[in-house]
Amino acid sequence: MPQPDKALPQVTIEAQRVSLEHRLTMFVSSITRSAPREEALQRWQTPICPLVAGLSREQGEFMLERLSQIAREVGAPLDREHCHANLVVVVTSEPDKLIKAWGDRGRVFWGERASVAAFNAFLETPRPVRVWYNREFGSPAGAPATRGLNMTLDRPFTDGVFTRSKMDVKDMLLLASIAVIVDRKEVDGLLQIGQLTDYVAMVTLTETDLDAPLGNAPTILHLFDARHPGEQRPAGLSAWDQAFLKALYNDASSQQILITERSQITGKMLHDLAP
């Protein structure tokens, strides 16, 4: 008689792959749900030029180097050393005042689908990290003309230093610039600079829904879920996060024009995580 127990390991492996594929599908669909199904997921085609303010020089340089390292690893474009900042990360004890001051100047919050209602929601929704995405229409072969971010930071808003970059069919919205405002009161004493930097990388390399249900997915996006002292927080980008970002930027020009983009990304993640 056949030995059914010999087939069990292969059956178990296949069952695990099916389960993992389902979990990855839910993860990708959830964190990208702010992008309509008929549109391409948003990504950078304009080279990224970051500026960090409000941290010590050592922390600022670490954040810049870590952001550039992640971008290189996943295949996102980076600008040369002397560039006009289009990814601004500010750590401040007065995030609401800073956002309102920038909003009054009308220079930072713009782009396709920007509106007064969207800005008010951004201003009035307190978070440890708030992210504003400026988008412009583009194509797989061409990036929008970068406008950078014309922002002014006064001492009442930040007590750190500026650290500049040293880094070398369907509608398609591309990331043109991003403003990240970090509430110092929510992160000081709770996070290491590496944790915060990895979180910023994850939410700025594509538009990420910060309210997405994540379940038990292993992801840096759980960083602010911990509500009690000593509760475990993600140490950095997870294997899922890295696989997602690599799949997003790998061969992006061909997959962007397909409505099956999310399923392609899920398939690449599955191959990367469970070859």
Image (spheres, helix red, strand yellow):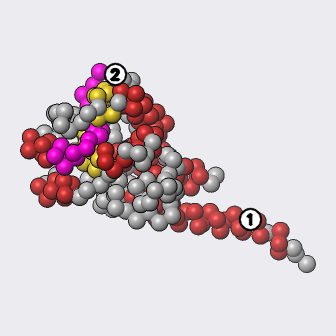
What residue is drawn where x is 18% and y is 37%? 156
Q: Is residue 187 magenta?
A: no
Quadrant of the image occupied by residue 170: bottom left
What residue is drawn where x is 71% and y is 67%? 12
C-alpha distance separating marks 1 and 2: 51 Å
Please provide the residue range marked out in magenta: 80-99
Q: Nearer the viewer, residue 88 or 78?
A: 88
Question: Residue 143 vs residue 247: left or right?
Answer: left
Residue type highlighted by circle 2: Glu
Specify few, some or many for label 2: CA neighbours under 10 Å numbering under 14, 14-19, or 20 or more: few
Question: Residue 96 vs residue 231: left or right?
Answer: left
Q: Is residue 93 magenta?
A: yes
For the N terminus, which image quadrant?
Answer: bottom right
> Tag 2's secondary structure?
loop
Please name which of the two marks, 1 or 2, marks the residue nearer to the observer.
Answer: 2
Which disc, if any, is residue 10?
1
What residue is drawn where x is 44% and y is 63%? 214
Residue type highlighted by circle 1: Gln
Specify few, some or many for label 1: CA neighbours under 10 Å numbering under 14, 14-19, or 20 or more: few
**Which residue in the structure is indicated by mark 2?**
81
Q: Residue furthest bottom?
A: 1
Depicted 66 relative to depicted 172: above or below: above
User: Does the image show residue 196?
Assistant: yes
